[in-house]
Amino acid sequence: MKAIVIACIVLSVVAVALADTECVKYDDNSGLPNPCVGKRRVRDRNQENTYCCADASLRPLGHRTVRAGQPGQYDYHCRCITQDEYCEEYPLFC
């Protein structure tokens, strides 16, 4: 019984860790190397920006600040929602 409880706790922690992978902004016109090579691409809810999800084991978990594509736009915190493969954007306010 004790082993079952421990296994459930471990699985819960792993599931939470994998659900919050890091997102990286990808801009086709930036001229920079593509950060999305080998990673799953995701679109934001407005289908305007493309991000890619890094593997949770390769990068720190948590939120990453990403620069919006056009000058004057907000920076965002981007959090990958792996269930529907979208990124949620949160404007940064100082």
Image (spheres, rainbow, N blue to C red):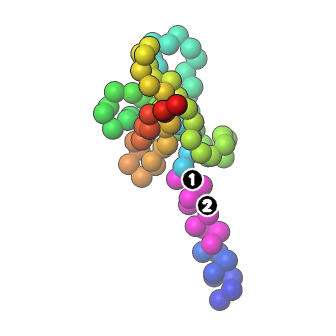
Residue pointed to by mark 1: 18
Residue at the farthest front position: 94
The residue at 34%/27% (across/down) is 48
Left or right of 23: which side holds 84?
Answer: left
Q: Is residue 46 magenta?
A: no
Q: Residues within 10 Å of mark 1 (few under 14, many from 20)?
A: some
Percent position (x, y) of residue 10? 65, 69
Circles 2, 1 touching at the beta carbon (< 8 Å): yes
Q: Nearer the viewer, residue 88 or 43?
A: 88
Q: Nearer the viewer, residue 69 or 73?
A: 73
Badge 1 marks a residue whose secondary structure is helix
In the picture, the disc for residue 14 is 2
Magenta region's main secondary structure?
helix
Residue 90 in which image quadrant? top left
Left or right of 64: which side holds 45?
Answer: left
Q: Is residue 83 above or below residue 70?
A: below
Q: Amino acid at mark 2?
A: Val
Q: Residues within 10 Å of mark 2 (few under 14, many from 20)?
A: few
Q: What range of the chain is rendered magenta?
A: 9-19
Percent position (x, y) of residue 75? 48, 27
Q: In the rendered image, is residue 39 in sight?
A: no
Q: Is residue 75 above or below residue 4?
A: above
Badge 2 marks a residue whose secondary structure is helix
Residue 4 in which image quadrant? bottom right
Q: Is residue 37 above or below residue 63?
A: above
Q: Amino acid at mark 1?
A: Leu
Percent position (x, y) of residue 9? 63, 72
Q: Is residue 57 above or below residue 68?
A: below
The residue at 33%/38% (across/down) is 45
In the picture, the disc for residue 54 is none
Mark pair 2, 1: CA separation: 6 Å
Q: Is residue 12 magenta?
A: yes
